[in-house]
Image (spheres, rainbow, N blue to C red):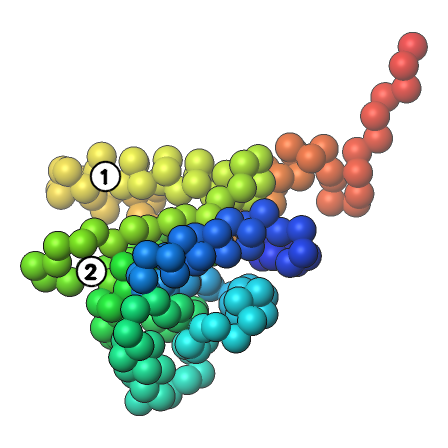
Amino acid sequence: MRRAAYAAPDTSAKLKRLLELVEDAQANGLKVVIFSYFRDVLAAVQAALRGRAHGPISGDLPPVRRQRVVDGYSGVRGHAVLLSQIQAGGVGLNLQAASVVILCEPQVKPSMETQAVARAHRMGQVRKVQVHRLLTVDTVDQRMLEILSAKTALFDAYARRSDLAESSTDAVDISERALARQIIEEEQLRLRITPDGPRDEPEPL
């Protein structure tokens, strides 16, 4: 469901917007890092960029090779694009050459986004890092944000009172399985789909 927006690259609104952001960065000589959880999404982005990207950095790429890819990207004068799985590039890599960060889809764990964006920030920097989250209205993206926003607000409320922070099962990070189940149920309800297929509309009287 989270990858559906990139399933048909020729008609993908997200991919079109991503290319616009990359073109704008190129016009301004800015480096871009593009994160996605999914390899096939990064493959679609790489194809759309027609080879004008470094990477992708993936989970099965050894740390030494990851750093070589980052070094090659950072060493380019002016504009360059780096593709990375968010769980691989979000921790342990220095991506401070980037001035633009693009997140292809919302992440199940907001902390994963925070860690990834933090890779592009640098001490004493003058230029701000632009962060773009690609979202589509009335889709699974919106369901995820609504659920995660409520969970984050609840966690923050309990975290302010440390003695109660662990006293509620709702005040903890939501699991991928629990979130997936909740999103699917809400999408089925919104689209009027039952587990066995589309819900029959009652015949007019």
Say if 12 sits above or below 26 in the image. Answer: above
Q: Residue at x 46, y 48 (%)?
A: 134
Q: Is residue 109 visible?
A: no
On the question of residue 50 being in view, the answer is yes
For the C terminus, which image quadrant?
Answer: top right
Q: Is residue 104 left or right of residue 113?
A: right
Which label number is shown at residue 91?
Answer: none
The local secondary structure at tag 1 comes to helix
Q: Which residue ends up furthest to the left in the rendered image?
A: 124
Disc 1 marks which residue?
156
Q: CB of mark 2 within 8 Å of CB of mark 1?
A: no
Amino acid bearing label 2: His
Percent x, y of residue 151:
35, 40
What kind of residue is marked 1? Asp
Q: Is residue 87 left or right of residue 52?
A: left
Residue 154 position by quadrant: top left
Position above or below: 59 against 103? below
Q: Nearer the viewer, residue 52 or 155?
A: 52
Residue at position x 54%, y 36% in the image: 137
Residue at numbered disc 2 = 121
Estimate the x, y position of residue 56 in percent, counting from the top left.
Answer: 45, 75
Say whether disc 2 or disc 1 marks the residue closer to the N-terminus. 2
Identify the residue shown where x is 32% and y is 62%. 29
Tell which residue pokes out farthest to the front in this image: 27
Q: Which of the 4 quarters of the picture holds residue 32?
A: bottom left
